[in-house]
Image (cartoon, rainbow, N blue to C red):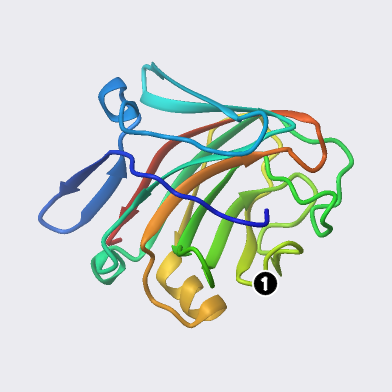
Amino acid sequence: MRFFVYFLCSLLVFATANSKEFRIDFTDKGMKLFKKRGFGKKTVYTNNQDDKGWYLKAEADGTATGLGMEIDKELLKEMPFLNITFKIEKDFTNIDQKTKDGHDWTARVMVGHGKKIGSKLVSLAHSSFLEEGFIQTSPWTKGSRDYVVSNDKSGEWHTRKINIKELLEKTHGISFTNFIAIFSDSNNSKQKIIAYYRDIYFSSE
């Protein structure tokens, strides 16, 4: 990905006596505030709900479009953990995600310092080809890091928790994020993929 654009979306904030959470809202009300933009064909994002609540479905077919929101740069001081739940219905076949031609991700959540020039980004990604913990500089953008947090091939919902504050300090020397974005793309490989997201939230614990 050679550039990054992010937009506003909705979220929910929850707090208990011992912990705090900052959640993205995938309900119909929240989805009204989501926007997307990209060149050419667009990744299709749709929301739905089951007995566990609301979720987001992403279908990419040679597309690269994201959904995102601006957030308070002070957030990570209180809630340094990012919780993400993925499900992969249809993944890529035979791509090398370490190269420009194969630099697509079925599911990823992006954070960091987003700006027009000189962004410092981290993509928390699912990969069926790379091991969890794999990290690299994006072959397209020097200021972006790909970090594989999921290698789950079960086709079931699975959750990962990442100390995003520590990760940003390690990769970019910053301790904040001013945005969070969901991004499913297949514009380089031209393959069709389907992924699901739910329960994406920052937490204090």
Task: Give the residue at the far right of this rendering.
Answer: 94
Amino acid found under the numbered disc labelled 1:
Lys
- Can you give x and y, in whole percent of width and height, for residue 88 in the image? 64, 32
Q: Nearer the viewer, residue 24 or 79?
A: 24
Compared across the picture, whether 87 is left or right of 47 comes to right
Residue 57 in the image, given as x and y percentages of width and height: 52, 25
Task: Name the image quarter holding residue 58.
Answer: top right
Q: Which residue does the numbered mark 1 point to in the structure image?
A: 142
Q: Is residue 135 left or right of residue 24?
A: right
Splitting the image into 4 quarters, where does residue 31 fall? top left
Q: Residue at x 79, y 43 (%)?
A: 188
Where disc 1 sits, the SS reads loop
In the image, residue 86 lies at what x, y percent?
Answer: 54, 38
- Residue sitting farthest toward the left: 17
Is residue 76 rendered to the left or right of residue 83? Answer: left
Q: Quadrant of the C terminus?
A: bottom left
Q: State the residue at coordinates (13%, 51%).
A: 16
- Please give the name of the residue rendered at 28% of the width and 38% of the height, measured from the top-left corner: 10
The residue located at (51%, 54%) in the rendering is 110
